[in-house]
Image (cartoon, rainbow, N blue to C red):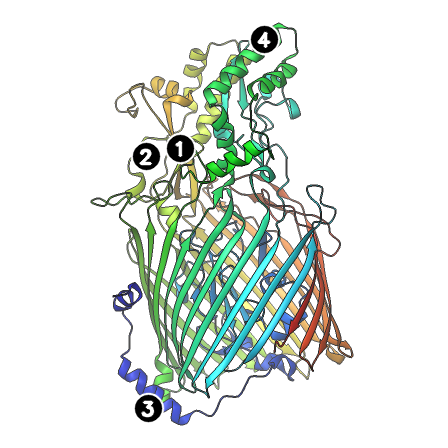
Amino acid sequence: MPPVLRLLGRVPVAFSLISVLATHRADAQRAAPQRTPTDSARTKNVALEEVVVAASKVQESILQSPVTVEKLNARALRLTPAPSFFDAIEHVKGVQVITPSLGFKVINARGFSNTTNVRFVQLVDGLDNQAPHIGAPIGNALGPSDLDINTVEIVPGTAAALYGLNAINGLANFTTKNPFSFEGLSVQQKTGLNHFNDQSTGVHPYSETSLRYAKVLVANKLAFKVNTTYLRGYDWIADNYTDINPSGNATTGLFGDDNPAGDPVSSYGNESSNRSNLILGGKTYQVARTGYREKDVTDYHLQTIKTDGALHYRLANNTELAYTYRFSSIDNVYQRSNRFRLADYRLQQHGLSLISPVVQVRAYLTRENTGKSYNLRSMGENLDRSYKTDAVWNQDYTAAWNAATQAGQPVAQAHATARAVADAGRLQPGTPEFKDRLRQLQDINDWDRGAALRVQSDLLHAEGQVNIGEAFRRQASPNFPQWLDLLAGADHRTYVVVPDGNYFRNPNPGKDPLTDNLTYSKTGGFVQAGAHLFADKIRLTATARADKNDYFSIRFNPRLTAVYSPTQRHNFRLSYQSGYRFPSLFEGFSNVNSGQVQRVGGLRVMSDGVFENSYLRTSIDAFNAAVTSDVNTGGLTRTQAVVKNQGRLVKNAYTYLKPEFIKSVELGYKAALLSDARLLLDIDFYYNSYRDFIAQVEAYVPISSTGNILTTTDTNLNAIATALSARGSQSRYRLWTNSKSQVHNYGGSAGLHYELAGGYLAGATATYARLDRTTNGDGLEDGFNTPRWAYNLSLGNEKAYKNFGFGLNYRWQARYYSQTFLVNGYVPAYSNLDAQLSYALTTPSLRFKLGATNLLNQYYYSFLGGPSIGGLYYLAVTWGMR
């Protein structure tokens, strides 16, 4: 039996097929023929007519949504100067977007953003499009093209009570065009240029070709569509060479270019695990391997090939059964803890959906194969080590330094001489030997010797939802209150990973770690009740959800909402909800040796015994720094300094993973103002409390000369301290665990959209986000990584003069403190002006769009450790799109 069918059998769906089909037949008798929808944004009083689904899983007025929801409709997408609908999301109120790559952008809302945002969920027609082993999407790699996108709905803030998909920071749902309503052939070509005035490279072309074809085969019964997109370009370059270890040799007075332990941000192979303490001239110096710049170890050419097809069958006018297949092949730069080159990275998804006013069922299988991808940090490390081991390099360095000082060279110059001697024979970027070695390491799936990322994983998901209230109303049940809404749903998800021997192994007892697939599952469900009271002036909803994840006990979380509408145009909302985020696959099960540090998942089945016998790396660093200082400046022997400072060592107090948890309160007001409802106002305020952040801690286990773990029960602290003062007598771990902090943050946003005479649409939004306080802060909680203030200003008109239109968007955000796995520091404030000019013909259906993002080409970083982002200038020609 196929795995999707086996999975469906495990899902407790609360309906029978017989009753579903009966509902379909009754629905077919009542429903009127469906007409092709018009762009409601062109009609009068659009604010009163716009509907959304993502906020409550049922259709409702956007004005009366019980939580904040933002929507990009067809008109907004035409007016945006962004090159794609996905890029346009950055201009949405309350949304933050960071850019690790031209082909990979990360969406977040309401704080605690990172380069792999596992707290924000992306859906395409209700199907999660994450990469399974990552637990988050790779931008829009598995999403729709501009030709097939219909609307975008974004829910900033937790949506976990309804969706249960780790959506504790927010959710976006991309709705595509139905082939029954949008039939025909559409073609789009985007041609552009970027990297103007880029010191790291010259100007490069950008191209994206898309095609969509939809056809109704049997009138109002059977239709299909196909989409394909081919994108090529040259990625943004990470070229930040700021030293993030400037004080590595402060006790010897070596700083700046004289620091032999320098660690530039966009350089790999000189990180902490690639440094040694060398005793030279009676002093201890911290010395790093030379490393390689990012642009030396990666290929910045990017390419994305996407295709999808869907077959739709209408059982009734409002009931559709659809099968969808999506495929994507990706070559670009991706960032998680480290930066990766994705090469021949493939995602595919099979989805089956049954959608009706009463019942919704979805089942899908997502498959991931990382192809020939590799870790840039491991590549830099092992390029150095592949020609000369650390031990040999250190010996050569020491001998050369001694010879140089004996010849009378100053200390700083002797370090430069020693590096040049030790680097003799080092592979030089661009040479045939360097390229051959890079290809060899790209294929070695062991990050202590190579750099390959070789993961194959699947995600199997099935869910069902029944609108009980709608079912009763359609049956005209006299005993069911018309003011009451009832909704219930259930879902099941299983991850399956093929062990690769480096990144994943099967840890379960009785399973072969290298041949038996690893599985990780979750089952959940919700019930929701809503009431429409006092002539629909008050709407109340209560939602209760339960989730059971492997390795964890059942978790419950509620959502309570209230909307007060004194008139149709004025709506006040209040909500309280909580949510859980369960560990992703790599947080729970990773098992990677990376730079002589083993990164281990935080589940007990992965790291049993490590937490109990390790010491915090932060305390070990402080201990060794104090030892070095006492040796270099205090006149103590190393043994004396170890005994003196051993009290600085701190035993690891962290333990095995628990789910993250959030509680959130939100207030909001949305109104359609003026007599013609042309002014839309939306204001929201929220307050969040987080606990048990899933984060990483580095902790080292002391090892005896015989290879046994040293514990406080069988040895004294002197032996442990001595072991932790030398690299060879410690096992190094980076462990996934939970922060002990409880974190509070708050913020809000306000937006005004005004449709002026003549078709002009003006908008202004402002977003405020602030970290309120951290209780029992231990420094492990994810960085807030969010600007305190951001605002957008926009102005556009599709027909400013005859068939000519334009769109302008100006975005500014304040500087903020960025904490990533690569580097910490302040991201400077930056602003962007995006602009487009358009010309549209109706016969033939042809549209030209000349646009630019970052029109003034002012390079900036959206986060530290990422690339420098300049202007992208493009011309888009679209034929046949409705």
Give the quarter of the image for residue 767. bottom right
Q: Circle 2: is it few (<14), some (14-19), or many (20+) Cα within 10 Å?
A: many
**Mark found first going from the N terminus, 1 or 3:** 3
Q: Measure the C-alpha gap from mark 2 to mark 1.
A: 9 Å
In this figure, which residue is indicated by the disc labeled 1?
699
Place of residue 619 in the rendered image (x, y in percent of width and height, measured from the top left):
44, 28
Residues under numbered marks 2 and 3 in contact, where contact means CB atoms less than 8 Å apart: no
Front-most of 274 and 283? 274
Q: Circle 3: is it few (<14), some (14-19), or many (20+) Cα within 10 Å?
A: few
Left or right position of 73 against 579: right
In the rendered view, would you say 187 is above or below 408? below
Q: What residue type is labelled 1?
A: Ala
Q: Which amino acid does label 2 sit on?
A: Val
Q: Measure the C-alpha gap from mark 4 to mark 2.
A: 43 Å
Q: Measure the C-alpha gap from mark 2 to mark 3.
A: 61 Å
Residues under numbered marks 1 and 3 in contact, where contact means CB atoms less than 8 Å apart: no
In the rendered view, would you say 374 is above or below 405? below
Left or right position of 760 against 441: right
Q: In which quarter of the image is the N terminus?
A: bottom left
Place of residue 576 in the rendered image (x, y in percent of width and height, measured from the top left):
45, 64
Left or right position of 801 against 628: right
SS for callout 4: helix
Residues under numbered marks 2 and 1 in contact, where contact means CB atoms less than 8 Å apart: yes
Place of residue 234 in the rendered image (x, y in percent of width and height, measured from the top left):
63, 50
**Mark found first going from the N terminus, 4 or 2:** 4
